[in-house]
Image (cartoon, grey):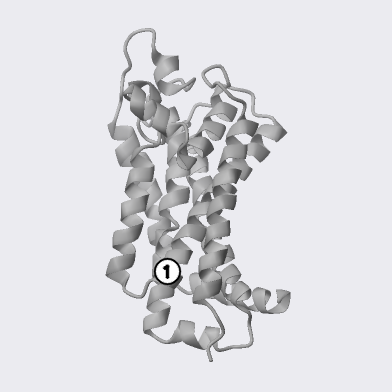
Amino acid sequence: MLLELGALTRREFIKIARNPQAIFTALVLPLLYLLLFGQGFNIVPPPGEIDYWFRGAPNYYSSFAAGMTGFVAVTATLFIGANVIFDKLFGIFKRTRGSPAPSTAVFGSRLIAGSAQPILLAFFVLGLALLFEHVPGLSGLQVTATVTVLGGIEIVVAIVLLSLMFATLFLTFGILLEVPQVYFAVVNLINLPVLLTSDALYPWGGMPPWLQNASQYNPVSLAVNVIREVLFGAAQYPYPPEIYLAGLAAWTIALASLAIVLVRRALRPIE
């Protein structure tokens, strides 16, 4: 199975490398978010509540930039399932299923290649936001805490888990559904509420109490909490990063388990 997985994964990465337009678009969109959306907003909290509103971040942009890392890790996975549907329409997916490769290799290869993109984009966003701090006239990500090796590992784990979770979810929808319009309707029905009930882009302190409570269980918020806690300190958080990572891991395991069951049924050997 490992041989087939390696071969199919290599093919998926070659497909990505041969589509420079998609790579360019994937890099430009986060840049526009950081330059236009983030720079254009300057949310000022009530006097004396900056720590409460931004949960330890020194300003809105720093809080926003950390949240954008999680935001990109989710939105970049949207087209993973769509690529499967288009491969179905062109007969590519059927030929792959008809090969000797097991269904786990077919699914795993697309999951590995598909989740690698949002992971890399998330770190691209984080690096850009840090770079902007040194560009005159631009706001940037200001790190106010001492980032240790453990903290860096926690950020990596948070981004990887978040990307894997949504890549698994959207890839499963791509395998189960047949029509692109239905796929995008379903993923937007999930994607938008998840993002808008998180504190990735909007200051946590400005949310109404019911939304603050809901956001605490949101997987995007769990990942972003880890990033912000490592970058800005733990004073405004009730739990250490390990607890948020445990919650994120629970979400990932639950969705991955459901995906395995559904995908095994959908990818039964063709008679």
Tell me if I can see residue 111 in this picture. Answer: yes
Q: What SS does tag 1 mark?
A: helix
Residue in front for this viewpoint, 142 or 260:
260
Q: For the point 49% across and 20% down, which residue is it?
A: 56
- The answer to which image quadrant residue 203 occupies is top left
Neighbor class of circle 1 (other Cα within 10 Å; few <14, some 14-19, many 20+) is many
- The answer to which image quadrant residue 147 occupies is top right
- Compared with 97, 66 (above or below) is above
- Compared with 121, 196 (above or below) is above
Residue position for label 1:
174
Residue in front for this viewpoint, 35 or 233:
233
Horizontal side of 104 relative to 128 (left or right) equals right
- Compared with 29, 245 (above or below) is above
Q: For the point 44% across and 48% down, which residue is it?
A: 72
Residue in front for this viewpoint, 147 or 167:
167
- Compared with 257, 153 (above or below) is above
**Residue lying furthest top:** 48
Residue in front for this viewpoint, 66 or 220:
220
- The answer to which image quadrant residue 199 occupies is top left
Residue 114 percent coordinates (x, y): 52, 63
Tell me if I can see residue 128 in this picture. Answer: no
Residue 226 percent coordinates (x, y): 56, 33
Amino acid at pointer 1: Gly
Q: How many marks?
A: 1
Horizontal side of 12 relative to 77 (left or right) equals right
Residue 204 percent coordinates (x, y): 39, 26
Residue 45 percent coordinates (x, y): 33, 16
Q: For the point 52% across and 74% down, which residue is it?
A: 265
Horizontal side of 32 relative to 5 (left or right) equals left
Q: In which quarter of the image is the N terminus?
A: bottom right
